[in-house]
Amino acid sequence: MRTRIVTIALLAWGLVSVAPSLAAQEPTDLQALIDDAAPGAVLDLAAGTYRGGVTIDKPLTIRSDGAAVIDGGDDDTVITVEAPDVTLEGLVVRGSGDTLDREDSGIYVKAPRVRIVDNRLEDVLFGIFLHQAPDSVVERNVIGAKDVFVARRGDGIRLWESHRTVVADNVVDGGRDAVFWFCDDLEIRGNRISNGRYGLHFMYSDRALVEANALIDNSVGSFLMYSKDLVLRRNLISGNNGPSGYGVGLKDMDGARLEDNLLVGNRVGVFLDNSPQTVGIEQWFRGNLFAYNQIGALFLPSVKNNVFWENSFVDNTVQVTVQGGGRFSGNRWTNDGVGNHWSDYAGYDADGDGIGDVPYRLDDLYDHLLDRNPEIMLFSETPAARALDLAARAFPVIKPRPKVEDPAPLIRPPAPPEPPFDLGVQPSATLLVGSIAMMAFAVVVVLSTRRRRSL
Amino acid sequence: MTAIVAPNAERVADVPERAQRRAIVAIARKELGDAVRSRWFWMWAIAFALLAAVLASVALPGSRIAGSASFGRTAASLVALVQIIVPLMGLTLGAQSIAAQRESGALRFLLSHPVNRTEAFWGIHLGLSVALLAAASAGFGAAGLVTAIRSGGAQAGAFLRITVLAWVLVIAMLGVGMLISVFARRASAALGIAVFVWLAFVFLGDLGLMGTAVATRMPVDALFFATVANPIEAFRLAALGSFVGSLDILGPSGTYAVDALGPALMPVIVGVLVLWMILPAVGAWIRFRTAKDV
Amino acid sequence: MIHIEELTKRYGNLTVLDRFAMDVAEAEAVALWGPNGAGKTTVVRCILGLVDYDGTVEVDGLDAVSRGKAVRSRVGYVAQELSFYDEMAVVDVLDFSASLRGFGTERVDEVIDLFHLGDHRLKRIAELSGGLKQRLALASALIPDPPILLLDEPTSSLDAHSREEAIELFERLRDEGRTILLTTHHMEEMGMLVDRVIAMEGGRIVTECAPAALADELGLRVWLHILVDAENTAKAQEALAADGFDSRLNAAGIVVEVPAQRKGEALKVLYRAGVEIEDLEVWS
């Protein structure tokens, strides 16, 4: 037996309040509710479980306060939107199928101007899939992936030909990418994307503004491909350490601008492959912090027309290098007499204008050898590798030709950009206890030797 | 003068069983006490703790921005510090141990007691091990404290794993030092050899391999295994593995290792380190037990 | 108590002990006597199992190698070089030694009293004089009240006064019924202490006898330094030569080499010849 309480109390506003029976054994049939609703109605779902696999074929608002669970029963797509102007708000969507080529999703949209806000998606193959849904808004959703082997995961967010869409303040963990195919003029802001393959992945999508996102512990923070005029600003891109991982990778790009980004602790901070691809276009890298990466910036050979200034290169194992060796000819490390800050700059600033009086030159012997013998990367950061550089400086018999020459290095690092997220590093209780235990051990050992009668 | 007979003692002074069992502990305690009382020990321990704490605080100002990445810097700096100081501590202390006691005649005094050579050897080894573990723990404790207060705890596990690896390394180096010690004629020679071995482990080995790789295009598998055979490198690679997660970052050789050994990679590297902890010490023990010249 | 046979010890090509054999009975005191390099110390080290050897060494019926710990628990040993741990304090060394033998600090306090080390208990070993080190070594050796004492050159690092004291102490220890084996190259001071002397040279036993008979057995010679008036020198040398004594001159006077038991004869010769002796020294 199923009791359905449908209150049509506020027809004037088209507001429908729906509550499933508390005693119900089976989930409420959401599809029936949708079918019964008038176009433009608002379905206010009460707490409880609703059966998924529904299709919305008319403009509707379906909303809840986070207590209504739409469960797809691990099959197919949970919610399919086929009509424009649909709003999904405050829902919990869970349990899609896991078939990649059927694109099983939490929410699959095929119409423009949808709003998907404040939803929580759990255990879904694809999270939010917008297919030809321009002018949409995807905001404040929390998206968790199916716990399957990485090659079988779907994308947390996937946009296909959905121009002018805003993707903001979402939290995506696990899954494959947040990927944008053929979408121009996107606004990607304030998202936090972690533990995926490519945090943000642009394919043939021009003029996006990518601002204040946190891309953390993915294989690649952001891979930008075949797109024009992307602007990445104030993003925190950290811990992207996949086997061929990059903080930001650019392939066949034109006119990208990276400003005030924090590129910290990645395998490679920025990777450049044939970007810019068009002659006569420059790409700008300004005010970014490249810190603690294995390689600060990695260029493929013959990449040209990139301009770096006002960036800080701090303690990257290799500050900048060209894959397979070589020099950065055709790129500039200074603009209008302003260069970059290099933590390994050994020069001085006698006239006190904040600009080093001798150029910064990257001419480490180890780096130089590394270019031609990448296998000795095995020894990076060993005392031996450092000794090699020291020896080469002390006895400059072998003077490698500098790879990089920054004629106007900044003595002080520019103030680091304000991070969009505080990573919320907490004092670690485990480490605290462990450290105190270790010190206590040392003290006990020392005290135990004081039992001698001479003392 | 009164009679020299011990009170309640039977005329035949057989050592009670329990005392024999305690011989190793008694010798270890004595060695530990001597080590802790020597100014070398304090110099090492304090230098290590200070450097470790300074490294941890220098590497961390960006932690709000960098989160666990800045821990990676702390860890990398600590690993480099450990690579240099910890082996030197273990090697010199180990090299001095038996050679100096033999030279001064103190070893003869010790062995004229109802103690056999096995007990004497492992007693010394145990005592010095505890002293070195305490010194290393003081350093890691100081660094850990700074890290724990100032940085994230996401990698507490990695930090503690590195600590354990450093413990294994320092005992391995003690064993190598004691191996030098049992073979050396004089304490000064033992110390000289120990310093040379340290140079070889820390610098010459790697430089030689780098040179060979550059000059001969050495295959990556040979390069990787030759590197891992060095206990200090085994420590570094194991430590790197525990806070970076993968040795892919080490270029083609690292990628080779990850591909070829798969999940066995870390066990192999740690296994090498453990073998270094066991084999030289056992070799030194066998030599000490069989070549009785004191 | 100590039984040794066919004991051979080689260092490389050098044979230090060559089929050495000896027995020491319970409560007997025996001296191993001989020049440096005779192998005395090596015998002691073999008994303690400190070195490898070929042959048989038994203490109280126990093999010195296979039952080394039991042997060493019956033996108190005073080494020639008196080495301990230089940086440790006297009381700590004794505590350590006691702990290795299963004795507690009470016994250590007793031996500290017995050997009058109370004033020195907190001194570092490196600060001790030879005499104090000697007392410390004996104190340590006597912690377990051992039935057997091995004393390797026990008086070599002592001044004359300490030497007398030490020998007196050894006699007491002997009288308490301990078996004592000591090495020395100053036989005269040990004469009263030991029952028997085993003279060694080149790793072999030269002779074995009571201490008083040693000089005869070995045909020992001494040097008499005789000071006479300058004008009597020639006369004295002639007289000595006439009776078969070889003599020569040095800055101090006439030097005559004589068998140890004929010292008096040489002096009688000079007396009969009417040479007045102004001073006399005996060198051995």
Image: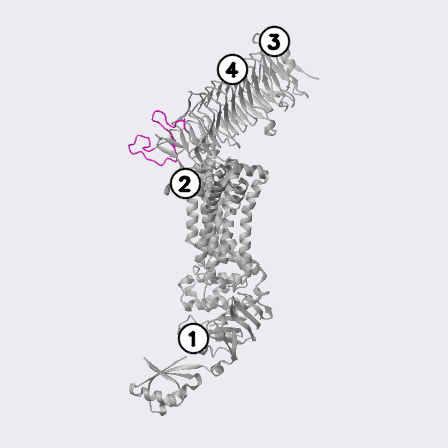
Query: Outermost residue, front direction?
Result: B216
Q: Specify whether residue A332 is painted magenta.
A: yes
Query: Outermost residue, right direction?
Result: A1
- Picture quadrant where residue B80 is located: top left
Vertical position of residue B238 compared to residue C72: above or below: above
Give the mark toward the camera: 2 or 3. 2
In which chain is the residue bearing label 4?
A
Instruction: Give the residue pinned by disc 1.
Output: C164
Mark 3 and mark 4: Cα distance apart in space: 29 Å
Secondary structure of the residue carrying numbered label 2: helix
Secondary structure of the residue carrying numbered label 1: helix
The type of residue carrying mark 2 is Asp
Vertical position of residue B52 compared to residue C110: above or below: above
Vertical position of residue B83 compared to residue C171: above or below: above
Instruction: Give the residue pinned by disc 2.
Output: A389
* Callout 3 crowding tier (Cα within 10 Å): few <14, some 14–19, many ≥20: some
Instruction: Give the residue pinned by disc 4.
Output: A163
Instruction: Give the residue pinned by disc 3.
Output: A38
What sort of colour scheme is used for the picture?
Answer: one colour
Give the residues drawn in magenta, as a range: A329-358
Question: Closer to the camera, C118 or A384?
Answer: A384
Mark 1 and mark 2: Cα distance apart in space: 70 Å
